[in-house]
Image (cartoon, coloured by chain):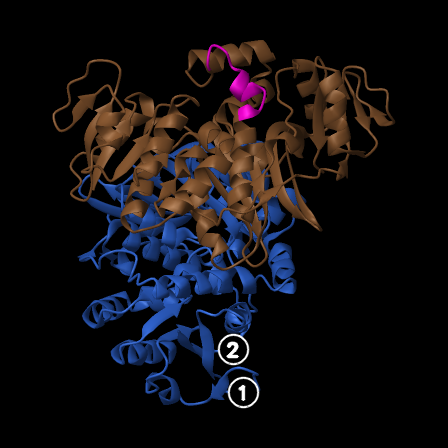
Chain colours: A brown, B blue
């Protein structure tokens, strides 16, 4: 199988290295704006050299960003080529454009590395769907946030110190918004829910709260109550539909989520017969991510399509109530005062996130227990 | 696909229930010594009614035990039928009889539920092998031992109290030897290693130490050093072969293994590109186990064979050295005295297990950190 590789950065180069020497697939062209010399592949600068080349069966998108990645992926699909990508923002933002096109063209479309990096998460959801109804997905899906929160908890660092450390190690970007504001996690839980439940969740109905405003004082208060703060995503079936949200969440010390160290992920699904199944691993990094891209290429070879049927559009309904830790001007009912913040009486997820929108300096964390 | 089900106990009944109503497979005959009436399947008492029935494509062995399960499975394979089992003792004990027969007959042979119950562990090793070299497997593979150790650690129970609780909840048998002496874990790590590395490890070269002799005083000493005792299995590639063993192991509080609660499992593989990947879930129970049996049946339908090539026989070599906590007459070099026991200087795994054989009332736990 001949592969056209779009992009030769962290992930693209990893894919090139892992496929080198395989007999069942080879990268024959690489789209790259810089001048590169490769022993086994031709470097090209025009996407047409790939999408109009009939000898290329599969396109791997490893450019990142929405544009022109979307236009290139669409052109590849329209040309009848299989597509593999690790670009969660792309798949999430253009789900309703890409999936019908994939179905119409009868090609493979895989994105396992988009959620959990090297964890075989989306492929396991696909496997799980064969036998049971998946009732819930979610967990710790962003290694950068986990690194920051873990270092605040275990080393007593301030948010700014922990962020700087994450940036120095290359875990966080100079502009860390995609990670710390929960956008990356939001993309991942929407994509996971779409595949687990066979729907297309409206992203506008999935609220997200990040960790940007957490302070060392907040973390101290959590510790005093034997709680650990993690950024946790949730997508689940409800009695009459779906609910989905991303928010800092306080879990008990000793629980599996509380013990997730450094930049690791812990992602979980619940099923009506398998019960709880969780996956712990490196959620990012060149080789883990490229590993799952190559796994997808093997699945393309074996004729797999997408992970789930393309389901109808659905809105998440987050009327579920829970208690929250809140700091920053909460004037609703409170059950406890923790000094730095208060614990609310049960309040709906939608109401709490709506309050947060009006209080951009505030911080909220759901109480999981 | 017509299925002949051997046994109608915990797992067998679960498989029957999950497959009911599926259009791609149906249980048409059930081998059961008791008189049962089933709406959609014929109950039979003679194995010939199944292995000599040309309408049956696949046999599910859910009887447990070595005999006559082995003879029945062998007869089914010889008759050219695909076989699915969750019986780790059977697959492990007769690996060198069954695998060549599977290859000769060109049939499917699946046993995903044999390791990790509902966790898609062996199937993920199979997937992983497609792209990378797996370098290590292992972890917490026995929920009964984890339940006992967790309750000793968190509730301060004695071994006897924790065992009685596990028995009352149905997690441990009246004779708990298979679990607490590490036999179950030993089967699982040998089978996992065979599949991960494509070999047939000689079980006699894989030493096993269990938890039968652990005391509340041992656990107190571990806690004082911020350590948690878990029964951990290891199988790995070494420079010139393989090493494999099962032993109580002291892990640091805050590490993922230390946080595994109740009767859960945490199983891990390391690969040269994916890095660390761990799986956390219910390692036993009717529906999780039956779930993976039915997953195997779907894989039979899609033409999958066994998980890995049947590799040559190999002996594990456990010359690796580590420090141990030892109680019960250790007369080798020691580096620390913990009151209830001592911490040794580094000693080889083989030497330590050999000492334990001569000191059946002793207790050892490897120091992982």
Q: Estimate the x, y position of residue A359 in percent, counting from the top left.
A: 74, 15
Disc 1: host chain: B
Q: Which residue is drawn at 70% across and 36% down?
A: A368
Q: In this view, does B285 lie above or below A360?
A: below
Q: Estimate the x, y position of residue A87 in percent, counting from the top left.
A: 42, 29
Callout 1 crowding tier (Cα within 10 Å): few <14, some 14–19, many ≥20: few
Q: What is the CA distance from the residue labelled 1 to the residue labelled 2?
A: 9 Å
- Locate the N terminus of chain B and report the quarter of the image it occupies: bottom left
Q: Residue at x 31, y 49 (%)?
A: B244
User: Relative to residue A22, is residue A102 drawn left or right?
Assistant: right
**The quarter of the displayed image where residue B239 is located:** top left
The circle on residue B34 is: 1
Q: Which residue is drawn at 44% across and 71% down?
A: B25
Both labels 1 and 2 in a single chain? yes
**The quarter of the displayed image where residue B357 is located:** bottom left
Q: Is residue A50 above or below residue B180?
A: above
Q: Estimate the x, y position of residue A149 in percent, counting from the top left.
A: 58, 22
Magenta segment: A173-183
The circle on residue B229 is: none
Disc 2: host chain: B
SS of the residue at dot 2?
loop
Callout 2 crowding tier (Cα within 10 Å): few <14, some 14–19, many ≥20: many
The circle on residue B8 is: 2
User: Relative to residue B271, is residue A137 drawn left or right?
Assistant: right
SS of the residue at dot 1?
loop
């Amino acid at each position: 199988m001949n592969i056209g590789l779009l992009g030769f950065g962290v992930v693209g180069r990893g894919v090139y290295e892992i496929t080198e020497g395989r007999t069942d697939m080879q990268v024959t062209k690489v789209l790259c704006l810089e001048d590169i010399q490769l022993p086994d592949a031709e470097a090209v600068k025009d996407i047409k050299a790939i999408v109009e080349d009939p000898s290329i069966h599969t396109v791997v998108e490893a450019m990142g960003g929405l544009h022109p990645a979307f236009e290139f992926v669409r052109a590849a699909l329209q040309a009848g080529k299989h597509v593999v990508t690790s670009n969660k923002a792309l798949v999430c933002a253009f789900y309703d454009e890409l999936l019908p096109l994939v179905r119409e063209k009868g090609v493979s479309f895989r994105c396992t590395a988009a959620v959990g990096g090297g964890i075989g998460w989306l492929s396991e959801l696909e496997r799980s769907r064969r036998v049971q109804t998946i009732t819930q997905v979610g967990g710790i899906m962003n290694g950068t946030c986990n690194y920051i929160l873990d270092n605040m908890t275990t080393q007593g660092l301030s948010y700014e110190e922990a962020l700087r450390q994450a940036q120095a190690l290359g875990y966080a970007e100079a502009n860390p918004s995609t990670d710390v504001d929960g956008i990356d996690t939001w993309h991942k839980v929407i994509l996971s829910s779409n595949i687990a439940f066979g729907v297309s969740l409206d992203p506008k109905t999935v609220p997200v709260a990040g960790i940007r405003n957490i302070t060392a004082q907040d973390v101290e208060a959590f510790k005093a109550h034997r709680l650990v703060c993690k950024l946790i995503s949730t997508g689940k079936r409800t009695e009459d539909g779906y609910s989905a949200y991303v928010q800092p969440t306080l879990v008990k010390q000793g629980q599996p989520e509380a013990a997730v160290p450094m930049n690791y992920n812990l992602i979980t699904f619940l099923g009506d017969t398998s019960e709880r199944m969780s996956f712990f691993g490196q959620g990012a990094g060149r080789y883990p991510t490229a590993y799952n891209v190559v796994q997808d290429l093997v699945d393309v070879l074996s004729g797999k399509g997408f992970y789930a049927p393309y389901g109808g559009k659905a809105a998440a309904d987050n009327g579920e109530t829970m208690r929250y830790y809140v700091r920053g001007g909460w004037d609703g009912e409170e059950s406890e005062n923790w000094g730095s913040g208060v614990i609310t009486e049960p309040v709906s997820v939608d109401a709490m996130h709506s309050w947060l929108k009006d209080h951009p300096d505030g911080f909220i964390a759901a109480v999981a227990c």
